[in-house]
Image: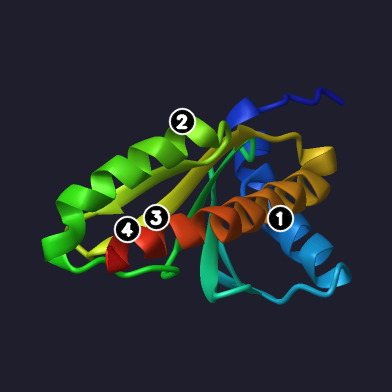
C-alpha cells in the first residue's frame, strides 16, 4: 500500500486546533471564552477600575496568535492629541504590549502578537492574556489621568 502525504490536507486538518486547545485550557483555568468563529476567541476580564475584552485570532497554520484588547477605555475626540503622548509613553514603558488609539471607534486598543506551538498553545496564550490584562490595568490610570487633565 502506497501512502501519499498531502501537506495541504495536513494544514487543513490542523487549522482551528489552536482555537480549540486554547479554549479548553482557559476553561480548565476557570476563564470563560467564547468562540466567535473557527479562528477567533473572546475572553472578558475585570480589573481594578475597569474591564477589557480580549480577542485571540489564530493564523491558518496555528503557528501565530494576535491578541487584541478592546473596550477598556473610550476617548473623546477632543482628547486625541493629548492621548497620543500617553499612548507613546506607554508603548515605551511596556515591551510586549502595543497601544493604539483607534480614532474610528474612539478607543485605545492593546495589541500583542506571538509565535505559538500547538502542543503548548493553551498555556502560552493564557499567559499572554494575563500579561495583557496586567499591563492594561497598570496603564489604565495613565490614560484616565490624560482624559481628565
Determine whether 23 is above or below 128 in the image: below
Mark 1 or mark 2, earlier in chain: 2
Instruction: Look at the numbered discs 4 and 1 and tell me whether their residues touch, using CB distance below 8 Å.
Output: no
Look at 52% across and 60% down and name the residue there.
Answer: 55
Instruction: Look at the numbered discs 2 and 4 and tell me whether their residues touch, using CB distance below 8 Å.
Output: no
Q: CA distance from mark 2 to mark 4?
A: 17 Å
Mark 3 or mark 4, earlier in chain: 3
Determine whether 38 is above or below 128 in the image: below
Instruction: Look at the numbered discs 3 and 2 and tell me whether their residues touch, using CB distance below 8 Å.
Output: no
> From the viewer's perspective, is the residue at label 2 or at label 4 nearer?
4
In this view, the residue in front, 35 or 137, is: 137
In this view, the residue in front, 116 or 86, is: 86
Q: CA distance from mark 3 to mark 4?
A: 16 Å
Of the numbered discs in the image, which one, if any, rests on residue 130? 1
- Answer with the quarter of the image where residue 28 lies: bottom right
Look at 55% across and 75% down and name the residue there.
Answer: 49
Element at label 1: helix
Mark 4, Cα crowd under 10 Å, few <14 / some 14-19 / many 20+, is: some
In this view, the residue in front, 65 or 139, is: 139
Q: Is residue 127 left or right of residue 91?
A: right
Mark 3 or mark 1, earlier in chain: 3
- Answer with the quarter of the image where residue 116 lies: top right
Look at 73% across and 24% down and name the residue there.
Answer: 4
Instruction: Look at the numbered discs 3 and 1 and tell me whether their residues touch, using CB distance below 8 Å.
Output: no
Instruction: Look at the numbered discs 1 and 2 and tell me whether their residues touch, using CB distance below 8 Å.
Output: no
Mark 1, Cα crowd under 10 Å, few <14 / some 14-19 / many 20+, is: few
Element at label 4: helix
Pointer 2: what residue?
92
- Answer with the quarter of the image where residue 106 lies: bottom left
Look at 59% across and 55% down and name the residue there.
Answer: 138
Pointer 4: what residue?
146
Q: CA distance from mark 4 to mark 1?
A: 25 Å
Amino acid at each position: 500500500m502506497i501512502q501519499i502525504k498531502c501537506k495541504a490536507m495536513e494544514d487543513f486538518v490542523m487549522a482551528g486546533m489552536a482555537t480549540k486547545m486554547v479554549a479548553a485550557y482557559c476553561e480548565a483555568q476557570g476563564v470563560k471564552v467564547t468562540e466567535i468563529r473557527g479562528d477567533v476567541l473572546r475572553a472578558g476580564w475585570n480589573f481594578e477600575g475597569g474591564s477589557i475584552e480580549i480577542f485571540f485570532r489564530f493564523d491558518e497554520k496555528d503557528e501565530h496568535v494576535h491578541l487584541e484588547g478592546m473596550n477598556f477605555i473610550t476617548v473623546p475626540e477632543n482628547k486625541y492629541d493629548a492621548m497620543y503622548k500617553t499612548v507613546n509613553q506607554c508603548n515605551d514603558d511596556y515591551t510586549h504590549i502595543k497601544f493604539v488609539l483607534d480614532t474610528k471607534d474612539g478607543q485605545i486598543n492593546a495589541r500583542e502578537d506571538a509565535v505559538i506551538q500547538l502542543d503548548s498553545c493553551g498555556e502560552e496564550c493564557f499567559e499572554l492574556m494575563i500579561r495583557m490584562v496586567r499591563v492594561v490595568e497598570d496603564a489604565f490610570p495613565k490614560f484616565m489621568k490624560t482624559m481628565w487633565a
